[in-house]
């Protein structure tokens, strides 16, 4: 019994590491810009499908794609923010609604593009499917790689935000845009950086996710909702809270999936969201007040 419980905990922690990267990009964009990027899941899916195409076409390690898609989406995200989001920032109260509409439209453009290029079938990679047995625990190689890399990239994001000048500037902007402006911070530039890094993190999550679960163009909406659930559970804009939420979700899904089956496992994120909105609407993190109240 103890070995089984330990197995489920290990699987849950590794799954949580993957979930953390899935949500951090969305969290960063919301924290700085107050925008829920509805194209987030489309970027994840597109990156995952591209990874599948690359690995099956070249027969090379799919992880070689990771730095490529990160850099490409970093540049693409900055461009998209300047062209699509920045022009509506100063639209007053309509800005939030307009940003939702713009990212909603962008999501469907990306999904339709993915359908035309990759088709609508679910695909998965056979790479890294070895099962390691360590001390009686059986762990899937792909889950280990995805979980550790996801947690590692998210950890690097935290180090950047907390211990570098550029990261602290971005963090200050996310906490209070008016205060950042008064300190001479180029808030417009920080918005572009946030969207660029958020898009790059989403693309990195897609590369890792295709190693663990099958993806298809229609999964984009599901991934956007899942990322938003994690962000909401952690506390909107709270990076440490998102880490706790991802870990909690991974653990609960691991146990529920084993004892109640896969169908029940898929309901877990939304059930947790309902419970938290009733019991602790501010989430698991320290963000006990609406973040957008500091930015207007």
Image (cartoon, rainbow, N blue to C red):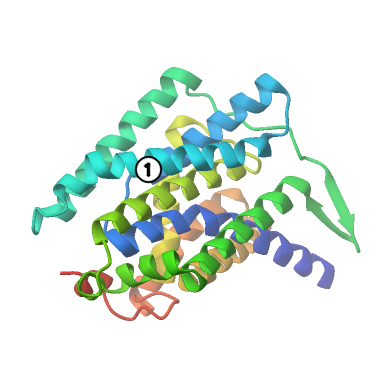
Q: Residue at x 86, y 51 (%)?
A: 132
Q: Position of residue 111 (x, y in %)?
A: 38, 30
The quarter of the rendered structure image containing the N terminus is bottom right
Q: Is residue 20 visible?
A: yes
| Relative vertical location of residue 56 with respect to residue 62 in this rendering, above or below | above
Q: Residue furthest front?
A: 184
Q: Position of residue 214 (x, y in %)?
A: 59, 36
Q: Residue at x 60, y 24 (%)?
A: 53
Is residue 78 rendered to the left or right of residue 142? left
Q: Position of residue 24 (x, y in %)?
A: 46, 58
Residue 228 sits in quarter: bottom left
Q: Position of residue 36 (x, y in %)?
A: 30, 54
- Out of 244 and 296, give the one closest to the viewer: 296
**Residue holding disc 1:** 77
| Relative vertical location of residue 184 with respect to residue 20 in this rendering, above or below | below
The quarter of the rendered structure image containing the C terminus is bottom left
Is residue 129 rendered to the left or right of residue 190? right
Q: Is residue 1 visible?
A: no
| Relative vertical location of residue 245 with respect to residue 264 in this rendering, above or below | below
| Relative vertical location of residue 98 with respect to residue 10 in this rendering, above or below | above
Task: Find numbered disc 1 in the image and state the secondary structure of the residue it sits on.
Answer: helix
Residues packed near mark 1 inside 10 Å, few (<14), some (14 to 19) or many (20 plus): many
- Out of 185 and 133, give the one closest to the viewer: 185
């Amino acid at each position: 019994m103890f070995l089984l419980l330990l197995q489920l905990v290990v699987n849950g922690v590794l799954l949580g590491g993957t979930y953390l990267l899935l949500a951090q990009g969305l969290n960063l964009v919301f924290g700085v810009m107050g925008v829920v990027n509805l194209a987030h899941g489309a970027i994840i899916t597109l990156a995952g499908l591209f990874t599948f195409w690359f690995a099956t076409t070249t027969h090379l390690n799919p992880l070689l794609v990771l730095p490529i898609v990160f850099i490409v989406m970093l540049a693409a995200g900055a461009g998209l923010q300047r062209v699509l989001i920045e022009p509506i920032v100063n639209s007053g109260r309509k800005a939030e609604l307009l940003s939702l509409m713009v990212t909603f439209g962008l999501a469907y453009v990306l999904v339709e593009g993915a359908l035309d290029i990759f088709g609508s079938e679910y695909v998965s990679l056979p790479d890294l499917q070895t099962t390691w047995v360590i001390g009686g625990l059986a762990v899937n190689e792909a889950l280990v790689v995805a979980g550790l890399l996801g947690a590692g990239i998210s950890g690097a994001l935290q180090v950047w935000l907390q211990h570098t000048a550029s990261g602290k500037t971005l963090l200050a902007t996310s906490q209070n845009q008016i205060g950042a402006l008064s300190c001479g911070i180029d808030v417009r530039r920080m918005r572009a950086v946030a969207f660029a890094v958020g898009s790059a993190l989403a693309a990195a999550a897609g590369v890792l996710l295709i190693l663990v679960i099958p993806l298809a163009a229609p999964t984009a909406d599901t991934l956007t909702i899942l990322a938003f659930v994690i962000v909401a559970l952690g506390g909107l804009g709270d990076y440490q809270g998102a880490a706790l939420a991802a870990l909690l979700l991974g653990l609960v899904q691991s146990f529920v999936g084993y004892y109640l089956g896969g169908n029940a496992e898929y309901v877990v994120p939304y059930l947790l969201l309902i419970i938290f909105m009733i019991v602790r609407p501010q989430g698991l993190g320290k963000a006990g007040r609406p973040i957008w109240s500091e930015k207007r």
